[in-house]
Image (tube, helix red, strand yellow):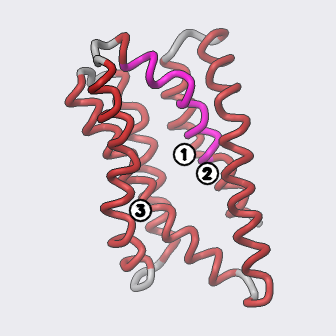
Amino acid sequence: MPLLVAEFVVWLGFGGLLPVLPLYFTQQGVDLSTLGVVVAAWPAARLISEPVFGWLADRTARVPLMVIGLLVTGLFGLLPLVLTGPLAFVILRAGAGLGAAIYDPAARGYLTDATPPDRRGEAFGLYGSAQMGGLLLGPAIGAVGADALGGIGFVFVFSAVTAAIA
């Protein structure tokens, strides 16, 4: 199913950021205690906004929400290359989390709609496996890519491109 491929690609981009984000943020002057806030901004934004976008996904077309979420994720994934500093990073990571919060409930709703009731557990198992597959391979791609292809900026571009491809 195309959604599973898209989910794998999205999480490949998320995973690509993992080994590099803390290093980049500390190189840009973020101290360790603030780094915790920067990193927490992504799940915090999802925690707060995902119920709202889940509600919206039940009342509007799911695919446009998925596209908007991926565009927001990609945009906020690139901006740390040009907007730096602790406050900017908190806002940008929250923005990326917001994009994921727009995308994910709509994608899960779409998966539910597209799957026969007797295969939904299987479909969600594959959906989770697609996420974890991307999360498994993404860090290696991010680290090797950053090392071989021009530094830390690679992972931000990689993450944005994966969001656009998905």
- Does residue 28 show up magenta in the picture? no
* Tag shown at residue 163: 1
* Tag shown at residue 166: 2
Q: Secondary structure at mark 2?
A: loop
Q: Position of residue 93 (x, y in %)?
A: 35, 39
Rendered position, 35 above or below 96 = above
* Residue type, label 3: Ile
Q: Secondary structure at mark 3?
A: helix
* Residue at image coords 38%, 79%: 55
Q: Which residues are magenta?
A: 10-25
Of 17 and 121, the residue lying toward us: 121
Does label 2 or label 3 sit earlier along the sequence?
Answer: 3
Looking at the rendered image, the quarter that the N terminus falls into is: bottom right
* Local crowd size for mark 2, using a 10 Å CA cut-off: few (<14), some (14–19), many (≥20): many
Q: Position of residue 140 (x, y in %)?
A: 70, 25
- Which residue was labeled with disc 3? 102
- Mark nearest the camera among 3 and 1 is 3
Disc 3 to disc 1, C-alpha distance: 13 Å
Q: Is residue 158 left or right of residue 67?
A: right
* Residue type, label 1: Ala
Question: Which residue occupies the extreme front position in the image?
Answer: 33
- Mark nearest the camera among 2 and 3 is 3
* Residue type, label 2: Ala
- Does residue 13 show up magenta in the picture? yes
Q: Is residue 143 left or right of residue 90?
A: right
Q: Secondary structure at mark 1?
A: helix
